[in-house]
């Protein structure tokens, strides 16, 4: 029906018809797939959720005399410095080692409240502070060589005083994920947040039917080079994400029944907004970062609309018991996102309260803001330069170090 070039021409003329994916789902119910496909050019999706496999690349610029950084901390958070002299990578889940005043996070003489204030921050908070324009304390130790004679550096940086500052996130936008519960007898503190004993609560992380990859289940539209909304700025799909597992079992509608495809994303953090990038902390687990990601889907044919019409009742996730400390944990079967969003789930005859880790409201807002960008002619679509591989198996490590394929 259409090509990306034709759609981009309409976008530049501000004549493109753009719907959020929720608007499309409503319209399909009203007029059917064929008519909806004739009416719309672009469908926008969105998610706002913790994405712990994220981080920032920074270049500080050279000092006088120059320094070859080999250890570096930003607001007490260790950054990786095994690149060029002043290139750094700050991981979102790296924990604070000391406060900006130089105090050790685990010093015995510090009261517990101050200690927790330090430990409750991490790389995600520092990245979010830089995006917000806040100053960040930097301390570095250098390797003295004939061309890099400086031994140490202590300064304050902002996003305006450094050169490159961009996010490179090895794993974002899980296509689907799990529902966490705790069938044991003590509280568990996990990457899904606290799970109370005796199945007292359940937590799910994916926003369901608005989520980007559930609306393009076979990644026919999303590939390497796809332009995306990333943290309030423009970003791109750089590669498949880590733990990318497209061979996950799937329903007849092609959506996976558990964790499946993932994306590696890249984008200029200097363009990003503090509204869409926020540091967060999981009690007794560690720091992370919440990022808004939106992906536009060009309506090239009716099949695009068929896939985007999927509803929460058509999507499922496995209920996983975290009380068993193994790589493969027992499950209580599959549950639909429609059921999860009611706030209650029944497990073994027991009614369990449920909460989302992703913000459903802000996921919708991401899709809406991306829609507004496209309607205003500020955001055009890209054709991928290569597809995301859909034949990757998922490998794990056994105790002897041999790789085992998980089917």
Image: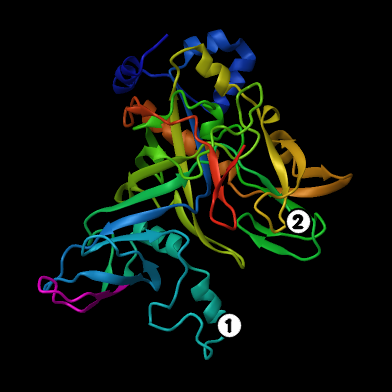
**Residue 293 locus on image (x, y percent):** 46, 41
Residue at the spot x=71%, y=29% of the render?
313
Relative side of 125 to 194, left or right = left
Relative side of 63 to 10, left or right = left
Residue 333 to residue 102: above or below:
above
**Helix, strand or loop under label 2:** loop
**Residue 209 locus on image (x, y percent):** 60, 32
Which disc, if any, is residue 371? none
Residue on which disc 2 sits: 182
Judged from this view, the residue extending furthest toward the bottom is: 109
Residue on which disc 1 sits: 112
Q: Quadrant of residue 207?
A: top right
Q: Mark 1, residues whose alpha carbon is within 10 Å: few (<14), some, or many (≥20)? A: few
Relative side of 237 to 406, left or right = left
Residue 378 to residue 185: above or below:
above
Magenta segment: does it hold 382? no
**Closer to us: 15 or 404:** 404
Residue at the spot x=45%, y=71% of the render?
96
Residue at the spot x=59%, y=38% of the render?
176
Residue 49 to residue 393: above or below:
below
**Helix, strand or loop under label 1:** helix
**Residue 285 locus on image (x, y percent):** 59, 64
Q: How many marks?
A: 2
* Contact check, label 2 and label 1, Cβ < 8 Å: no
Residue span colored magenta: 138-153
Give the Cα distance between marks 2 and 1: 28 Å
Which is nearer the N-term, disc 2 or disc 1?
Answer: 1
């Amino acid at each position: 029906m259409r090509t990306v070039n034709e759609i981009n021409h309409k976008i530049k003329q501000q004549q493109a018809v753009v719907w959020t994916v929720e608007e499309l789902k409503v319209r399909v119910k009203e007029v059917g797939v064929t008519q909806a496909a004739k009416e719309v050019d672009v469908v926008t999706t969105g998610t706002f959720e913790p994405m712990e496999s994220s981080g920032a690349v920074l270049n500080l610029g050279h000092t006088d005399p120059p320094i070859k950084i080999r250890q570096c901390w930003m607001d007490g958070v260790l950054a990786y410095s095994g690149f060029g002299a002043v290139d750094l990578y700050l991981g979102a889940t790296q924990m604070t080692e000391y406060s900006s005043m130089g105090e050790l996070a685990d010093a015995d003489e510090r009261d517990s409240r101050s200690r927790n204030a330090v430990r409750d921050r991490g790389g995600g908070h520092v990245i979010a502070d830089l995006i917000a324009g806040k100053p960040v304390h930097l301390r570095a130790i250098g390797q003295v060589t004939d061309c890099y004679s400086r031994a140490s550096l202590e300064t304050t940086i902002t996003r305006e005083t450094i050169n490159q500052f961009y996010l490179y996130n090895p794993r974002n936008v899980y296509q689907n994920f799990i529902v966490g519960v705790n069938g044991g007898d003590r509280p568990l503190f996990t990457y899904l947040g606290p799970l109370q004993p005796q199945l007292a609560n359940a937590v799910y992380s994916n926003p369901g039917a608005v989520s980007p990859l559930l609306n393009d289940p076979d990644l026919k539209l999303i590939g390497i080079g796809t332009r995306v909304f990333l943290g309030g700025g423009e970003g791109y799909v750089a590669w498949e994400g880590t733990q990318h597992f497209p061979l996950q079992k799937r329903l007849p509608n092609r959506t996976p029944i558990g964790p499946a495809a993932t994306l590696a994303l890249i984008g200029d953090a200097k363009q990003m907004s503090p509204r869409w990038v926020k540091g967060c902390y999981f009690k007794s687990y560690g720091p992370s970062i919440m990022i808004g990601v939106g992906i536009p889907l060009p309506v090239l044919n009716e099949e695009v609309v068929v896939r985007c019409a999927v509803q929460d009742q058509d999507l499922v996730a496995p209920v996983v018991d975290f009380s068993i400390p193994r790589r493969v944990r027992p499950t209580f079967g599959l549950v639909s996102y429609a059921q999860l969003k009611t706030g209650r789930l029944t497990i073994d005859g027991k009614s369990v309260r449920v909460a989302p880790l992703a913000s459903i409201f802000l996921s919708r807002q991401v899709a809406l803001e991306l829609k507004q960008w496209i309607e205003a002619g500020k955001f055009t679509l890209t054709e991928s330069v290569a597809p995301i591989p859909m034949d990757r198996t998922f490998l794990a490590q056994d105790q002897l170090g041999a790789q085992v394929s998980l089917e």
